[in-house]
């Protein structure tokens, strides 16, 4: 019997450590290498967590991009041996965070961690490519109710209310759009 609620450690967002100041170069090189080695389907996105800071330079206010985590780059990828090798051997990459050495595979960030980082950066977390309307049944993919299917009962901007059946009782649950997926027929 297969349990579809198990978390896959083969796909997700991973943190790679770089030499401080080389984050942009690592991002460029990694994307270039993904194309060169036909790994674009395995190395999906590369992000450098930044924030815009207003600072005074020579008496003038200026907006400056500042790294939130100097020396670290986020990579969304399918963790195969080949993809691991490409990322790990990219110039100026010193390793994966969460790897225990000896060629062991790292563990991905938790969904909520990456959501918080990407939303804070103003990045699109996940595109919703299906119609969302009151009455539609969807599957919850993140949070305490992950794996449950429930109908949408209310839509308020990017927030949804679903009615989850728990212990024979209808329980309203408020979620963000990125926490649901379409139920494939």
Image (tube, rainbow, N blue to C red):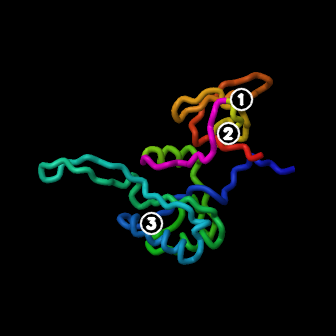
In the image, which residues are magenta? 121-134
Residue farthest to the bottom?
36
Label 1, secondary structure: give it.
Answer: strand
Label 3, secondary structure: give it.
Answer: helix
Residue indicated by mark 1: 164
In the image, residue 88 lies at what x, y percent? 54, 71
Between label 3 and label 1, give the one nearer the viewer. Answer: 1
| Marks 1/2: CA–CA distance | 10 Å
In the image, residue 25 lies at what x, y percent? 40, 69
Nearest to N terminus: mark 3 or mark 1: 3
Asked if the magenta segment contains residue 43, the reply would be no
In the image, residue 34 lies at what x, y percent? 54, 71
| Mark 2 crowd level (few <14, some 14–19, many ≥20, 10 Å Cα) | many
> Front-most of 66 and 124?
124
> Front-most of 155 and 79?
155
> Front-most of 31 and 101?
31
Between label 2 and label 3, give the one nearer the viewer. Answer: 2
| Marks 3/1: CA–CA distance | 41 Å
């Amino acid at each position: 019997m297969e349990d579809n609620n198990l978390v896959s450690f083969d796909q997700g967002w991973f943190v790679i450590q770089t030499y401080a100041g080389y984050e942009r170069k690592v991002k460029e090189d990694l994307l270039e290498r993904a194309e060169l080695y036909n790994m674009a389907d395995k190395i999906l996105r590369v992000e450098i967590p930044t924030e815009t800071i207003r600072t005074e330079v020579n008496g003038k206010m200026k907006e400056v991009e500042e790294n939130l985590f100097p020396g670290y780059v986020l990579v969304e990828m399918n963790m195969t041996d080949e993809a691991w090798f490409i990322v790990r051997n990219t110039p100026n990459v010193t390793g994966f965070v969460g790897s225990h050495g000896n060629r062991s595979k790292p563990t991905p960030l938790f969904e909520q961690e990456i959501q918080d980082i990407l939303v804070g950066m103003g990045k699109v977390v996940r595109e919703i490519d299906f119609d969302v309307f009151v009455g539609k049944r969807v599957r919850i993919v993140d949070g305490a109710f992950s794996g449950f299917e429930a109908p949408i009962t209310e839509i308020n901007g990017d927030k949804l209310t679903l009615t989850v059946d728990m212990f024979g009782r209808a329980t309203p649950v408020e979620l963000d759009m990125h926490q649901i997926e379409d139920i494939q027929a």
